[in-house]
Image (cartoon, rainbow, N blue to C red):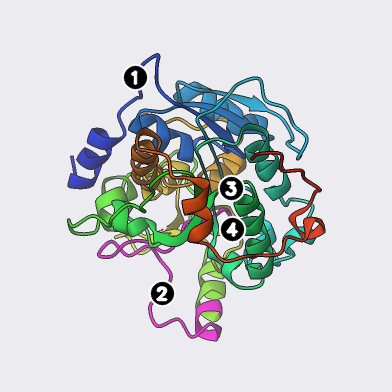
Amino acid sequence: MSAYLAHLKKHLARPVLRDDAPIALDLFAGCGGLALGFEAAGFRTVGYEKNQDACNTYNANLEGDCHAKILTAATKYPIKPDIVIGGPPCQPFSVGGLQLGMDDPRNGFPAFLGAVGQFKPKLALFENVRGMFYKGFDYLMQIIAHLESLNYSVEMKILNAVDYGVPQKRERLFVVAHRGFWKFPSALQSPQFTAGDAVRDLAEVEPPNPKYLTKSMDDYVARYEKASKCIRPRDLHFDVPSRTVTCRNLNGATGDMMRVALSCGRRRRLTVREGARLQSFPDWFDFHGTEGNQYDQVGNAVPPLLAKAVAEEALRCLKGPMITLKQIKAKRPERAIQPELVGFQFTNNES
């Protein structure tokens, strides 16, 4: 067993939760990458996700229940969570998703903010692409202003999954709204894991229904990489962490696909399990649905090891002291809220 697989076994064993575990309401839950990290840290999760196959994956692997439902700002939830977490769809703010922001019908932030306003927990956090810092920056500032109007202190930081034991360079924005004392997790001091640590043992074993690149596909890749001025072919290189795993490169076009170069000279598209290893899903975590849907579940997920690092800090914050409204207001700038930009009208009745 590689050091990486031993690391996964140690940190992401099947969750066994205490009855008094704090409850995390997990919105836009996908297959449960964020939830797996939170359950590993000691939370109980309740998920909501519109894709039934992803819900089936979540329910087959996690202690928490995931409900197939399309969320809106007005959705009511039959629980009282200690924390609201989630990954509102990233396509409105990603380069691959055209960065339509609040004008994208997939925008999930009104639903996320609606849940935070409904429960006003001590802590809420969401993950999204770093593209929110660019074309989506004005909208991000409105989201933060909305959270501040609900009397939260709000902090944000881009975290790279490779710093938390994930064998993949993956930068994502985390925004945390809290009424306690929060700090982002520190990067691990141990060496980074590589793609080889994650999938070397799988790469040379022919999987069922392998997807080898044809000569015409190899020729297309060569033209694509020449036009893109690639210094190093975009195959999976075993001596370094992988590039970012996404739906687009796991299950998408030939030019950008995640692929492994084999000792026989052929190249093969990554399998679902290989993609899951790069995302830090343990091998006991099984995916449900069609192969294409499983690829999407893997590519959309928050890497569980990164999720656990964030969840451990969330648990510390929840167990720690509250800060006063006066302290919260003293440390933040004044911002004007434009409700039409946030996505819905709201009323703050909290004193």
Q: Which mark is residue 151?
A: 3
Q: Which mark is residue 16?
A: 1
Mark sitting earlier along the chain (2/1) = 1
Vertical arrangement, residue 186 with respect to residue 115, above or below: below
Q: Secondary structure at mark 4?
A: helix
Relative image position of residue 38 (x, y in whole percent): 41, 35
Identify which amino acid the numbered label 2 is placed on. Answer: Pro
Vertical arrangement, residue 115 with respect to residue 151, above or below: above
Q: Secondary structure at mark 3?
A: loop
**From mark 2 to mark 1, how far is it between C-alphas?**
43 Å
Q: CB atoms at circles 2 and 1 under 8 Å apart?
A: no
Q: Which residue is nearer to you in this view: 172 or 74?
A: 74
Q: Secondary structure at mark 1?
A: loop
Q: Residue at x 19, y 44 (%)?
A: 2
Q: Which residue is mark 2?
A: 233
Q: Which residues make up the magenta segment?
A: 224-247
* The C terminus, quarter of image: top right
**From mark 2 to mark 3, how far is it between C-alphas?**
49 Å
Relative image position of residue 126 (x, y in whole percent): 54, 48
Q: Which mark is residue 248?
A: 4
Identify which amino acid the numbered label 1 is placed on. Answer: Val
Relative image position of residue 290 (x, y in whole percent): 61, 35
Q: Nearer the viewer, mark 4 or mark 1?
A: 1
Is residue 173 shown to the viewer in this render?
no
Q: Is residue 246 magenta?
A: yes
